[in-house]
Image: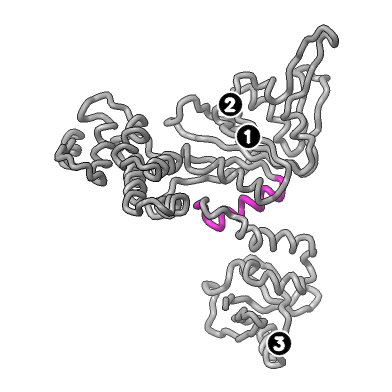
Amino acid sequence: MKNVILKAGTTEAGKAILMDKLNNQYECPVKDPKNKQKLTWAVKKEAFVKVIVKEDGLTYSVSNSSTDKDWTKNASTILADQWLNKPAANVPAEQLEVMNFIHKDSIDLKPKAMKMTELKWKYLMRSAMRGKNIMMTGPAGCGKTMAAKSVVNALDRPDYYFNLGATQDARATLIGNTHFSKNEGTFFSNSLFVEAIQTENAVILLDELSRAHPDAWNILMTVLDESQRYLRLDEAPDSPTVKVASGVTFIATANIGNEYTSTRQIDRALLDRFIIIEMEMLNGEEELELLQLMYPNCDVDGLNAIAQIAAATRKEVKAEVPRISTSISTRATVEMASLLYDGFSLAEAAEEIIYPQFDDAGGIDSERTFVKQIVQKHVDDGSDEDLFNVEDAESTQE
């Protein structure tokens, strides 16, 4: 049973309706005469109405004590079924279908292993459905590519993948190549990208856009511009163009920040062609939930240790004077968990996965030594060795 607080009122045509704070309008079925009487009074007074959603229907109570603070901001998720059965006069049926998918059906399509808020997931799905250019930003290994691929799976549309950070020849990847053969002489062949943009309703994933060569950005400018949406096959002004098909959605991923090598600062004009969805690292509790979901047979204490080690590095990197320049990603914690699953110890997993990510220059003052001290708190290897305690670490900073 779920409840919402709505405000009673009328349309311009004088029809009784209920509204949430976003001004979504609802015509809920009224079978009980008592309910009808309550709603009639509420409409006259423009009062708040408490709608109680039960399996067998809706009941109403006039809420004299409710204020704007109690007013439900968006009731479309809870009232989707009732709203769709009898839509408000000013909302097209097609729009109601879209909203029902975004706020209700899409939630069931979100992978359990993807730790993203429901709001962010709904915004991501809505943006993809509306054909927006989407850029997923955030630290390396936080799940950007996984989120993008999850959208593809949820929408069940044709999809294409291009890793722009791994290509050295942007023109060959995005436009095509000139070839020569004895039989045909010199000829030009289009790239897979040309095929992709001509595929209706395709979802095109542009991975590692922040590592792409600036030539790739220049080629993509007209492709991503909503007022143009075409690909020019040559730099000459009168060269042929390829129009982007209807319904095509572009999803890019980017690591934005100085800590990422080979990452370029994306041109502002290119950024303006995207809506930005920011991904964040998980906290310790979320990390543990993910690792347990992926490796349910692993020792919980070991998985918890991995999660806590990662959380400690993420907290430290955000400190006013951080002692490390990067943190342990979710990609790295998953790999560590896989080593535990295959019989490696936590100490061995840290030795192979964590330590190589941190600089060992500076001896006891190095990033690696500091991270080893974090790991050692969770490792029981029978050793009495203590790299240095917290007080020693802090004194080296003074």
- Mark sitting earlier along the chain (2/3): 3
Rendered position, 374 above or below 286: above
Rendered position, 73 above or below 255: below
Residue 212 numbered mark, or none: 2
Q: How is the image coloured?
A: one colour
Q: Residue at x 25, y 29 (%)?
A: 366
Circles 2 and 1: CB atoms closer than 8 Å: yes
Q: Secondary structure at mark 3?
A: helix
Residue 206 numbered mark, or none: 1
Q: Is residue 53 visible?
A: yes
Magenta span covers which residues?
115-131
Q: Secondary structure at mark 2?
A: loop
Residue 274 numbered mark, or none: none
Q: Residue furthest right?
A: 183
Residue 40 numbered mark, or none: 3
Determine crowd level at label 1: few under 14, some 14-19, many 20+ residues with C-alpha closer than 10 A: many
Kind of residue at badge 1: Leu
Q: Position of residue 117 (x, y in %)?
A: 52, 55
- Mark sitting earlier along the chain (2/1): 1
Q: Residue at x 50, y 28 (%)?
A: 263
- Mark sitting earlier along the chain (3/1): 3
C-alpha span from label 2 to label 3: 62 Å
C-alpha span from label 3 to label 1: 54 Å
Determine crowd level at label 3: few under 14, some 14-19, many 20+ residues with C-alpha closer than 10 A: some
Q: Position of residue 97 (x, y in %)?
A: 74, 62
